[in-house]
Image (cartoon, helix red, strand yellow):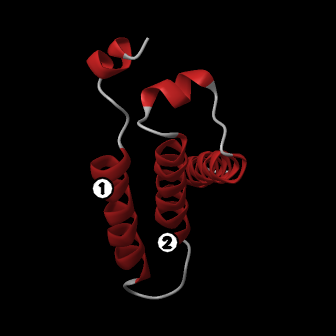
Amino acid sequence: MNTSTWTLVVGGLIGLALTGFGVKVLVTGQAPASTARAFGSVREAGLYHLFFGVALILLVGGTKLPGEKTSIVTAVVAVILALWAIVRYRPKRQKEVDEHR
């Protein structure tokens, strides 16, 4: 397995893990204490991880899908999802986390 394939596999697995974690948090309504403290709500934590995971899967998967512009389109969609997660669901700043302890 060459380096680029190995990197794509690892990236895809990380994306799947983030997506799975986000789905689990959303379905159960529970998150680990450190994750719950870092976000405004458990729902925000789940969506943040879900969007980042899906974005990473799109970014990795788009490199192997057929079509001339497929990788560009999937990369743009992945960046939009990641930006949406950062702007809308980002973790609280450290000062905000310390105030909630």
Query: Vertically, is 16 above or below 61?
Result: above
Query: Vertically, is 63 above or below 13?
Result: below
Q: Quadrant of residue 40?
A: top left
Dot 2 corresponds to which residue?
A: 62
Distance in Å between CA atoms under marks 1 and 2: 18 Å
Q: Which type of secondary structure does the marked residue at label 1 adopt?
A: helix
The residue depicted at 56 percent of the width and 72 percent of the height is 64
Residue toward you, 24 or 20: 24
Amino acid at the residue labelled 1: Leu
Q: Quadrant of residue 32?
A: top right
Q: Which mark is residue 83?
A: 1
Quadrant where the image shows the C terminus = top left
Q: Position of residue 55 (x, y in %)?
A: 46, 60
Residue toward you, 42 or 64: 42
The residue depicted at 38 percent of the width and 35 percent of the height is 91
* Sequence-first disc among 1 and 2: 2
